[in-house]
Image (cartoon, rainbow, N blue to C red):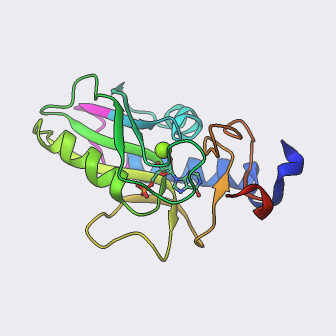
Amino acid sequence: MERDIERILLHHDQIRERVRQMAAEIAAVYDQRRPALTLVPILSGSIIFLADLIRELPLKMKIALVQVSAYPGRAVTAHEPQTMIALSGEVGARDVLIVDDILDSGRTLRRVRAMIAERHPASLRTAVLLRKRSKAPPDVQADFVGFDIDDLFVVGYGLDFGDHYRNYPHIGVLRPELLP
Ligand code: IMP
Ligand code: MG
């Protein structure tokens, strides 16, 4: 796995520190006395970020899952996202925080936001670990962003290529010869 990575963009220590700060930013926004929070992680890319984030978040919460795939198979450019697993859990009348690994073309978030909005949440916000600076469209904003990065294809810390590399602990740039 290591030898497929050209360089480390974000080291795990750096990610951990930023995730801690993000948890503090998020905790400051919600009412800790009347918690009605539901996190909606977008599978599968958000799993590692979610696991680290929620353990730093001192709020009572529920989790509702949804799986959307914008990069089927070994694609490295975004396609129209497909809903693979429909949204489970309670989001109506609750404070909903969508959690995703990366905001790229914004199509995934646009779709998931619309799905949740139909069920009338009390509030709807989004947290992403990464945002591709040049690409995120103006109508799809994230309320909490870990890092702004260049338009590179990255893997690790949950992010995949062909469903591999999610367990790589850092966020790295794949060797270009491995990309289609
Ligand atoms: P969007 O719909 O184009 O914003 O794409 C968002 C989804 O595509 C994310 O949830 C990721 O799963 C995936 N994605 C986007 N960019 C990358 C990348 O650089 N590496 C791995 N997955 C990515
Ligand atoms: Mg994803």
Question: Is 172 on the left-hand or right-hand side of 92?
Answer: right
The location of residue 59, given as percent across then percent down, is: 39, 32
Quarter location, residue 66: top left
The location of residue 165, given as percent across then percent down, is: 71, 41
The correct choice, above or below, for 67 with respect to 71 in the image is above
Q: Which residue is found at the position 35% from the left and 52% from the top?
A: 80
Label count reads 0
Q: Main secondary structure of the magenta part?
A: loop
Q: Which residue is found at the position 74% from the left and 49% from the top?
A: 170
Q: Nearest the camera: 17 or 45?
A: 45
Quarter location, residue 55: top right
Residue furthest to the right: 3
Task: State the quadrant of the N terminus.
Answer: top right
The location of residue 136, given as percent across then percent down, is: 40, 69
Please say whether residue 33 is one of the residues in the magenta stretch. yes
Q: Which residue is found at the position 76% from the left and 55% from the top?
A: 178
The correct choice, above or below, for 10 with respect to 30 in the image is below
Question: Is 41 on the left-hand or right-hand side of 30?
Answer: right
Residue furthest to the front: 180
Quarter location, residue 52: top right
The location of residue 50, given as percent across then percent down, is: 51, 36
The correct choice, above or below, for 54 with respect to 171 in the image is above
Question: Is 53 on the left-hand or right-hand side of 109?
Answer: right
Q: Which residue is found at the position 50% from the left and 48% from the top?
A: 71
The residue segment tinted magenta is 28-38
Please say whether residue 69 is one of the residues in the magenta stretch. no
Task: State the quadrant of the C terminus.
Answer: bottom right
